[in-house]
Amino acid sequence: MTRTNICHSSNSEHLLHRLHAIQQQYRHIPSQAMQQVAAEYRLPVSQIKSVVAFYAFFSTQPCGRYHILFSNCTSCGYWSNGHNLLQSLCQLLQVTPGQPRADGLVSIDETSCIGMCDHGASMLVNGIPIIGLNPEKIAHIAQQINSEVPIQHWSATWLEVPDRVRRRDLLLSEAWIPGSALQQALKQGADDTLANIQRSGLRGRGGAGFDTGQKWRLCREASADTRYVICNADEGEPGTFKDRYLLLEYADAMLEGMTVCAFVIGASQGFVYLRGEYRYLLPSLQAALDRRRTQGLLGSCILDREGFDFDISIVIGAGAYICGEESALIESLEGKPGIPRIRPPFPVTHGYLGQPTVVNNVETFIAAAQITVHGADWFKAVGTSTSAGSKVFSISGDCEKPGIYEYPFGITIRQVLDDCDAVDVQAVQIGGPAGVLLSARDFNRTIAFEDVSTGGSFLVFGKQRDLLAIHRNFAQFFAHESCGFCAPCRVGTQLLKITLDNIAAGRGSTGDLEELQQLSQIVQHQSHCGLGHSAANHVLNGLRQFPHTFTQALKPHFTARFDLDRSLASARQITQRDDAAAHLDNR
Amino acid sequence: MTDDGTNTIRIDEQEIPFTAGQTIMDAALAAGIYIPHLCHYPGLSPSGNCRLCVVETGNRSVAACTTPAAAGQQIRSDTPEMNAARKAITQMLFVEGNHICPSCEKTGNCKLQAMAYHLGMLDDHFPQFYQRREIDASHPEILLDRCRCILCDLCVRASRDIDKKNVFAIAGRGTNAQLIVNTPSGKLADASIAVTDLAANICPVGAILIKEQGYQVPIGKRIFDQSTIKEIALQEHSAQQETDRDS
């Protein structure tokens, strides 16, 4: 297969966008359409089928005309003050979850975190976020749907996603002047611009913390004719929503950071890979791109520099957490399922279309732009010796003031909790389900690459929270998001979920704790990529920090894992019986 | 690097040579060292999906089949801990699918079964998933039973890279992942696969079976009744070396 045009047809529409349009038109992707797309893009039909099967927002069975996806995140999920809002809406509209209503009007299902965690229970209706759900709002929504009111005509206040920035530091308090970083870069030249980034100590803000300057240098030094710049705006870690805000308010600085990178490494094409859940941000991002093109900050001869040509396209994902992993993201950009590549080689030498590619987070590019304007010392003056600068957090969960907070690296967890008015805190989950679960003994620890590292997710769990339910939620998340490529992650994440569910159902015994430990270690050590490596962190942390979570759910006497009564469910269904004698469990 | 200038790596207690471009797996097999594997096959590009060949080097766990050998690597492979993890992964593959060893035509010739023997697996350990998976009996000569598929990707690579037919692919996420056929109907009958293709014969388990060949070799005289999976893996490697030398 040639490595050019592999995801673009003659009209240059990205495969994911083409499939999204079909999904919108037919409420699913019919088999006929897959064949047609395969012919248009000159791709094997199996590739189209595997792409459709991979991404959660594509379906081969029709969805309702109102397709509702409730977030199942611990912060923006459908449990609101003890109410199961998903169940409520299903009852009001007479819908079975996962199946469209017989008249085809509505379908209701759940999806992984949609990044609305600071607004409580939230959902996507035909891709449009509706936040701050409660039983009253759910009742209104049911009425709107039954009366078939188009979403555009729903209450305007429902369609707003306000942002709450509660604390600004280095990046967010600095005014931004479009073109300022590029002017500085052109003045000092590519070598000095790169040296400045390297000297600043900037490390990737997505969570992994790789040295940004070194990444750019490795890419610049890799021999190739073409290089690419990619902004990872696939903010999928549950509890993370800071990029949602940055993409709206700091898009220009982000695009300029990408352009500075292009200048340094010699790229002429860039991509913003935007998560499908943030599709509603597309118009404002497109406007930012258009504005920069008219200002001579994108396109050919940027700022009248002969030969400095660079432009950026936006590619929108379709519901796959794994695409936040940089090589999976690149696969997705290439029009394939987002399965992480074998690394090495790394994207800096073999990235998009096999060419050297820089992939950085939204916040990293904004920081790079500001560092170019203000200098390395401005940045290094804040933070710690190995974690320079500041970090933007997404704080949600059991606190009075959820929202976006920017802190210098080195801030203690306790300070953050005080600032967001979190009282009676039982635990914090930092870095999302893939991160680390900490108890009060660790609240004096600091947020920094050398201590507790995070891509920005900061989940607060109060004393009243059932931590076992949190673990089950996280385990369900990883089992759902595992790409299925490697055996230990594909099967192991399911087994973790099954074991935790079993313990919660009162069918666990002491041996299950040992089982969880061993299973977690296998998933952590044997898996192919970062998803598997981190999927069991929460279980291992929980077993160590909060053993009571698990032990209190265990039965003192032997309990068989096999649930006879549940196993008879299909027999009851077939015989249409549900009387007492059809239940054999002697609870 | 040793004194005479050849590159070497150490696997467990054994120092072995390697040539540039070889993976840890290639170097090990060439030196007669067996690292358990199901998705690696000599002559096909590595995939790294079964993870049985994961070894430890330094404080990292890496797949031997996809990791380049590098001078001075100290590798731990045949340890009780690593083999316990391998056994657990083999058990995972068993419970994920619907494996019917006693009545499977592949019994005795099956690498998953042979791996279980090799690793001393005595039970499934984990709860069965009992997933519904589609059987494709449309092709007159070849049966595709997804119940027994372990998603090793060998048929995908064999068909694409050796047979040049690109008959198979894997689609779907997590445990919904399944082998699909690259035809509009999705049926094997409409594919150009032939019984002589490598893709029709490379399946390590009983997912792709040639029809009308049941029990030609009696149970007791089958491949893994005569040899261990270790011996067979080393033979497969030498056979590929012969082919490479001849061509």
Image (tube, coloured by chain):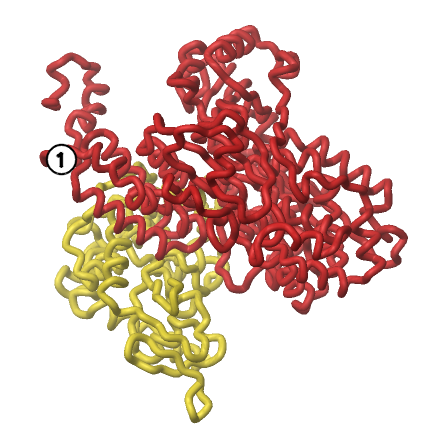
Secondary element at tag 1: loop
Say whether residue A336 is left or right of residue A135: right
Say whether residue A242 is left or right of residue B242: right
Question: Can you tell which chain is drawn yellow?
Answer: B
Front residue of B223 and A79? A79
Residue A5 position within the rendered picture, expressed as x and y whole percent measured from the top left:
67, 51
Q: Could one spot residue A264 in this view of the protein?
A: yes
Chain A colour is: red
Residue A347 position within the rendered picture, expressed as x and y whole percent measured from the top left:
59, 59
Name which residue lies at 84% across and 51% down: A302
Front residue of B66 and A508? A508
Q: Amino acid at mark 1?
A: Ala
Front residue of A359 and A403? A403
- Compared with B115, A244 (above or below) is above
Residue A154 position within the rendered picture, expressed as x and y whole percent measured from the top left:
62, 12
The N terminus of chain A appears in which quarter of the rendering? bottom right
- Compared with B47, B29 (above or below) is below
The C terminus of chain A appears in which quarter of the rendering? top left
Q: Could one spot residue A21 in this view of the protein?
A: no
Q: For mark 1, what is the residue?
A: A560
Name which residue lies at 53% across and 8% down: A140
Q: Image quarter for residue A424?
A: top left
Q: How many dots with numbers?
A: 1
